Image: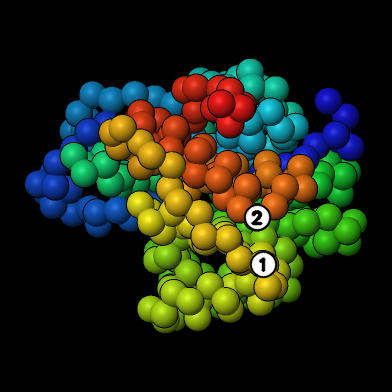
Amino acid sequence: MAHRDIEVLGIGNAIVDIIAPADDAFLVTQGLEKGGMALIDEARADALYEVMAAGIEASGGSAGNTIAGVASLGGRAAYIGKIRDDTFGGIFRHDLRSLGVVFDTPSAPDGPSTARCLVLVTPDAERTMNTFLGACVNLTPDDIDEDLVASAAITYLEGYLFDPPQAKETFRKAAQIARNAGRKVALSLSDSFCVHRHRDDLLALVRDHVDILFANQDEIFALYETDDFDAAAAQAARDAGLAAITRSAAGSVLLSGDDKAVVAAAPVHRVVDTTGAGDLYAAGVLFGLSRGLPLAECGRLGSIAAGEIISHYGARPETRLAALIAG
């Protein structure tokens, strides 16, 4: 696939998810904040893995999930993220390439192992994430393929990438290349805890470099330090140009200038695991935007993609999304 053909390029933390059921008592015993994302070291990752229930292993990472979704919808997608030349790294690369995604970032020959996220899913389908970033922290500006970024219609950045110090510069470099080339930059705030950690830097990035902002209600409240949804959403649209904000079962709101779309959540027979819901919502919206579709239709595609992902364990589609939207 030629670089000029790429519709959405994702840049993020390349992570393999280990997903297992847990009850609230287990979270309390382990001192975990329900519904949040905590950064842990390799020793803690190993210790938590030992006491978790049996689960599944699947390639994840927020932007990686989004890009997998774009590809599943039929979009032309690419990815930049750092992995180690180990088993998990090989799995991650294979999983994306098998979907037709361009993923050519070189593997690290040494250093920390490929990142993994231990995801605990409670009976209410809420997910609590514990992330060992591993090789992700070694994503540097040198890993950015400038031609790829400059030619992709939309470059999508995940907020979690703001945690590793080196990656912040990588983030800003990619955003600047895209904007200089007249391309669009999209950002996902990723997690309200992430927003609290980096609020000032994220707000500056949104105002200076971002054209499309993705957030859920908690994240947008954290960014603008308010609990007034309408005010926060309007400010996000002014700062970024286009804001797409999810509200769980209440669906989503998309705002751009005077254009506003309120979109219902897709009906789901049974919610199994909310891991990746926001990622796949972003995939549907980005796919729609890359095809020049109206905001309401972009939101509808996002709802369909999110609905598929929460119907099963794992944050990658089990059903070809292109078939779902065609139906």
Q: Is residue 79 visible?
A: yes
Q: Earlier in the sequence, mark 1 or mark 2?
A: 1
Residue at position x 38%, y 39% from top?
267
300 over 234 or under it: above or below: above
Residue at position x 57%, y 50% from top?
299
The quarter of the image holding the N terminus is: top right
Report x, y in % for residue 186: 67, 56
Find disc 2 in the rendering and name its residue: 295
The quarter of the image holding the C terminus is: top right
Residue at position x 85%, y 34% from top?
5
Report x, y in % for residue 89: 55, 26
Report x, y in % for residue 313: 35, 29
Disc 2 crowd rating (10 Å Cα; few below 14, some 14-19, many 20+) is many
* Element on which disc 1 rests: strand
244 over 282 or under it: above or below: below
- Amino acid type shown at disc 1: Asp
Residue at position x 18%, y 54% from top?
31
Tell which of 298 and 187 is nearer to you: 298
- Amino acid type shown at disc 2: Leu
Give the Cα separation between the discs numbered 1 and 2.
8 Å
Asked if marks 1 and 2 touch (Cβ < 8 Å), the reply is yes
Whether residue 95 sits left or right of residue 267 in the image: it is right
Find disc 1 in the rendering and name its residue: 259
146 over 179 or under it: above or below: above
The single residue placed furthest to the front in the displayed view is: 327
* Element on which disc 2 rests: helix
